[in-house]
Structure formats: structure tokens, C-alpha cells
Amino acid sequence: MPMKGSSQEDTIVRLLKQSRYLCHIESRKIRQLADNSLLKKIPSGQVILNQGEVNDRVYIIVSGSVSVHIDKEYIYNLSRTGDIIGEMSVITGGPSNATIISETPVDLIEISSGTLKQIHGRNTHDLHSALYQWFSSILTDKLHKTSQKAKQFERINRHLQRDLAEAKSTQDRIFSSQTHAIPNFPLTLKCEFSNILGGDLYAVFPVDQSRYGILIGDVSGHGTGACLISMMILNLFMAFATGSKSPGAVVAEVNRLSQQFMHQGKFVTLFYGVYDPASLRLLYTNAGHHPALVLRNDRILMLPATGGIPIGVLDDRDTIYREDIFYLETGDRLFLCTDAVFEERPEQTGVFQGLTGLAEYLNTAWTKSSPELVESLFKLRVAAFRGGLPDDFTLMVFDQK
């Protein structure tokens, strides 16, 4: 609600002199500006400026606090007497680049761009020059603040990148420590994350004196959150996947305990099997993960899915994970992977898509060694996405000797 009268003009003059941008302007020039200004009272919670809308007003804060939002995200607040709002859109003639909302009841001095043009039109050269200096000082101040914030963000980013690199190194060491060699069943492994940290997980570890656990999993999402979940899931397997416990029982226990830390909407798909080198028997279960593949000479065999739900989807103590058995033969190659190895995406070009496409590719490339197959598959996927991976890529190939 605007107020104007001789007493208000005196008030505006006094308040304009308090602005750090106008404090050095001569009193007579401040009086000219005050003659063309209004004092407004804005209630709490009112939108003063809308991002993207044309604005033809400059506002000077007298009292109260306003918040600045860009793309609906809170950026900072302004609460000092003399702080300026809306000057950039008036200077450039473009729409407002931020939304301004009153956090408390606010008193503002309002100056319209029309008023500024009228002043200029009257050839009031001194005042126009003063206003030009005013806008210049505002721009200089904002550029200085932007420069300082950029330096601060640069320092924070350096620390963040260092911390992420250390976390990546730790994650790699954890995976390496849980990837044991199995006699006559060598592993060729490729794991590349789409970000510095990833949500894929894998492990090869002894469950007793003669058998080995084989695990591969994929946490929904990417980055730090997915990485933390993958590490906690891996820790649960290391704690419970020992002795005579069956794969289904282990995965059911992991599912139950994961409810304590699984975020809303997060889940993990995984394949877990127990391999016996003496009998070449693989007892396995599947928690929402795609089937494993076996390359037997020039044929592709798809291990039957066991129909289990992903980890973290249901908080159900009675969830059952069925098991199945597959007997490997000498010369077989067991393929386990996450979905980035074959995932169908509209932006990819010139490469197979889907699990069926992967099986067909392996059927034509079966003469390649396992390291050659792994590298060729990785290069195909990277090339399909023009040099980048949209998801974490993990591929495990075991050769039965």
C-alpha cells in the first residue's frame, strides 16, 4: 500500500540517504529522486517480483526481510536497509531473473523505470548522472560478491572433489578385498561408474572351506546415496553369507535388515549364488535382477529366473526367495552384469539393445577370449552413448576350466 505526502517525502529522503549506494549523492539530488518515489508496506508472504516476468520497478529495502528464489530454489535473503531489488531487470530491460518474496512485513521505497525516464527526459543531467553512478555501484558491488562467491565455491569444489576421490579409492579397495580368486574358475571383471561414486556392487568370497559366494547387485539411482546403500548391502552379505546358509535365506535376511536404512523409493536388484568348485554346482537366487547367461561353445543358455522381488521394496519378514541349481561344464563362461551392459535407451545408436540383444551378440562373438569380450562390450556401450555412460557398468565373466 503506497503512501505519499510531504512528510513521506521527508521520510523517503532520510531513508535514501541511508542506502550505501546513495549515501554519497548530494542532498538536492536525493530530494529530486524522493519526489518521484513511493513508500510501500508489503505484508509477509507476498510475491514482490516473479522470475520471468517483466519488471519496471526498483525497490530499496527500508526494513524487513525478503527471500530470493531462482527456479523455485531458495538462494539467499536480503534484510539490510538500503539493499536493492529489481535493478537488474530495469537496467537490462529484460524480465526478472529471480522471484522475490517477503519473509516478514517489509517497508520498501519504490522507484519506477518510467520515473527514471521522465527525469532523464527533463534533461536533469545531474540527477541522471547520479543515478547512473548509483546503478554502476550496484553492479560493481554485485560483481564483487559474485567473484567472492565463485572463489568460495571453487574452494568448496576442490575439497569436494578430493573427498569424492578418497571415497572412490575406499570403495575400490573394499570391492577388491571382497573379490577372491576361485580355483579353476577365473574371473574377468569390468566395473565403471557413470559418476565418481556408483551404486553397483559385486563380491566373490568364501562362505566355507570349499564353496564361494558370488554376488552382483545394482542400487537404484546414482552417486553418493547409491554408493552408501551398496556398501551397507555388501556389509550385510559379508556378515550373514557364511556357513551352511542357503542363498535364499541370506537374501531374505538382507532384505529384512535393509529396511533400517533404505530410503523411500530406493531398492536393490541382485543375483546371489553359492558355487561349489568340486561339483561345478551353482545354487542361486535372484532378487529382481535379470537372469545370468552361460556361453557354452556357440550356444547361449539363460539361467531360469527365481522370481524374487528387489531388496527394500517390501518390509515383509516372510518374503521368500526361491532358489534354483545350475551345473556348469568345462569350457562354460558365466556372465553376470548390471543393466547398463544391455539396457535399452532411445539415445543410443548402432548397438544391440536388451538382454536378448546381448545374448545374440555373445552368440556371434563366442570365439573371443573373456578379456576381449569384456572390453569389446564396454567399448560398444560407451560408443553407443557418444563417449559417456548413463548408468554404472559392471560385467563379471567366469571361465570354467
Image: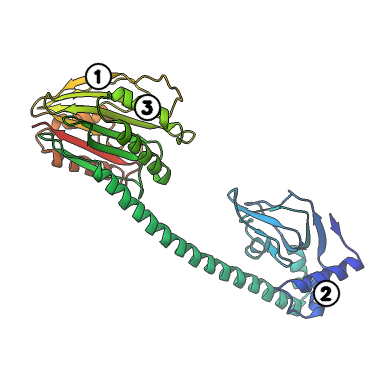
Q: Which residue is mark 3?
A: 253
The disc, 2 or 1, on the residue closer to the chain's N-terminal end is 2
| Quarter of the image where one finds residue 310 | top left
Whether the residues at callouts 2 and 1 have beta carbons within 8 Å, the answer is no
| Quarter of the image where one finds residue 298 | top left
Residue under the point 10% across and 38% down = 369
The disc, 3 or 2, on the residue closer to the chain's N-terminal end is 2
The disc, 3 or 1, on the residue closer to the chain's N-terminal end is 3
Whether the residues at callouts 3 and 2 have beta carbons within 8 Å, the answer is no
Whole-percent x and y of residue 33?
79, 71
Residue 334's disc is: none
Distance from the alpha carbon under mark 3 to that under mark 2: 77 Å
The image quadrant where one finds the N terminus is bottom right
Whole-percent x and y of residue 119?
77, 71
Q: Which residue is mark 2?
A: 31
Residue 324's disc is: 1
Which one is in front in this view, the residue at disc 3 or the one at disc 1? 3
Q: Amino acid at mark 3?
A: Glu
Q: Amino acid at mark 1?
A: Asp
Whether the residues at callouts 3 and 1 have beta carbons within 8 Å, the answer is no
Distance from the alpha carbon under mark 2 to that under mark 1: 88 Å
Closest to the observer, 83 or 316: 316
